Amino acid sequence: MQNQTSQAANQELAAKEAAKAVVEKVAALEEGCAMVTWRVGGCCGEATIPKARIALDGRDLDSELISGSKIRWFPREEIKFVNTIGTRLQRKILSYGTMLNGGVALVPICKLKECYEEVESIKADFNSKLNESCSDYHSKIERLKLDNTNVADLIDRFKLDVDAFRGRFSFNVTPPIAFTPLYEEDQDELVESAANNLYQEICKEANFIWSEKLEGNDRVGQAPINSYVKRLFQKMINFSFLDEQLNNVTAVFEELLDNLPKAGWISGAPYEQLCKWILICGDEQKLRNVSKTGYNTLLAPLAQQQAPTPVMGGLAQFAPEPTQPAEQPSPNQATSEPVPQVEVAAAMDQGFGFGLGLGGF
């Protein structure tokens, strides 16, 4: 009796979540989107010495053709928070939106309030870290001089006072500019660019979920599902108007979520299903193939699945390979995780019970 009650409660919860997803999708389409830009900047704690004598092979060189060198006058570790928070801000905005060209994000209007509330929280953290850097400001410079007595006079010469130092820091997120998805033919290029960026961001977020929440584990709790997996699903729904074929992906994603337990740990066959789908989403070519093809047979009910093979024994063979660090971002973009190239086709015939008929893609 208790199991029946629990099953009924889970079904009711799933129905409510499905209804909510439909409502949010309609809202995103009807209300349109807004363009958002941002920039996080700060003082580098360095100064360029205008003209320097340089020793090379035992000779002192002094020429107008030699550019100046740099002197650090403030501890590097005290300003690292700028890059950290810049990365965090970009990830947060793009979790609600998708990137256009030129460092502009497209965010559904129905999500703006929620997005900007989280932006304000990040801004508060930025200001807190800045206050910490400015506290005991002169003592920090004096300690740097003691550790570098040979250039102490240069540190004194080029250092900024605390007010000028603070003035170099900025945290700016522009007010949203309305952008309605009622496109004319001459805007097709913009839409195509946004759609391409969307697929790339989906892959980045999926690989983040894999590497940070799933890889090396044999189960996952509900918190990562609610905080990351469902947010990725909602992002696909919100921006499906950019590429109607993305509806084929959201259909698979929705059925996957419906088959996951709504409480407690997710392990065994459901965990296998989740891992394989996240890995597919982490490979742009595989993801585009799913979006183009569509399937008559989606995920079979988990109750009918055969027992899965051990998780890492089956998944390790197509786990993401390490990649080289990403290139440095432009000023209003922050560093994001590298996008591993994931090979999943070999796993489709392994008897994991994914039920998608993806073996040939």
Image: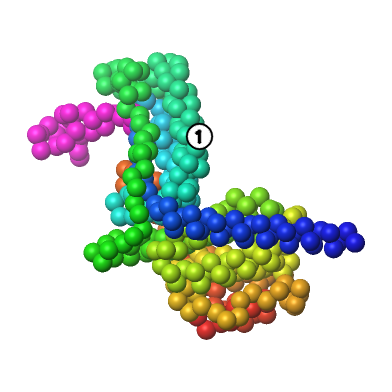
Farthest residue, direction left: 64
Residues rendered magenta in the picture? 43-71
Residue at coordinates 27% horizontally, 28% vertically from top-left? 47
Q: Residue 82, image x and y in percent? A: 41, 35
> Residue 137: in sight, yes or no?
yes
Using residue 309 as the reference point, say whether residue 26 is left or right of it.
left
Using residue 330 as the reference point, say whether residue 294 is left or right of it.
right
Name the residue nearer the viewer: 221 or 83: 221
Give above or below for 309 relative to 196: below
Residue at coordinates 36% horizontally, 58% vertically from top-left? 181
Q: Residue 38, image x and y in percent? A: 36, 41
| Secondary element at image label 1 | helix
Is 329 a magenta residue?
no
Using residue 234 as the reference point, say whether residue 305 is left or right of it.
right
Amino acid at the residue labelled 1: Ser
Q: Which residue is mark 1?
A: 121
Q: Residue 349, image x and y in percent? A: 62, 82
Farthest residue, direction front: 30
Asked where in the image residue 310 lies, by quadrant, the reply is bottom right
Is 54 a magenta residue?
yes
Q: Say which quadrant the N terminus sits in.
A: bottom right
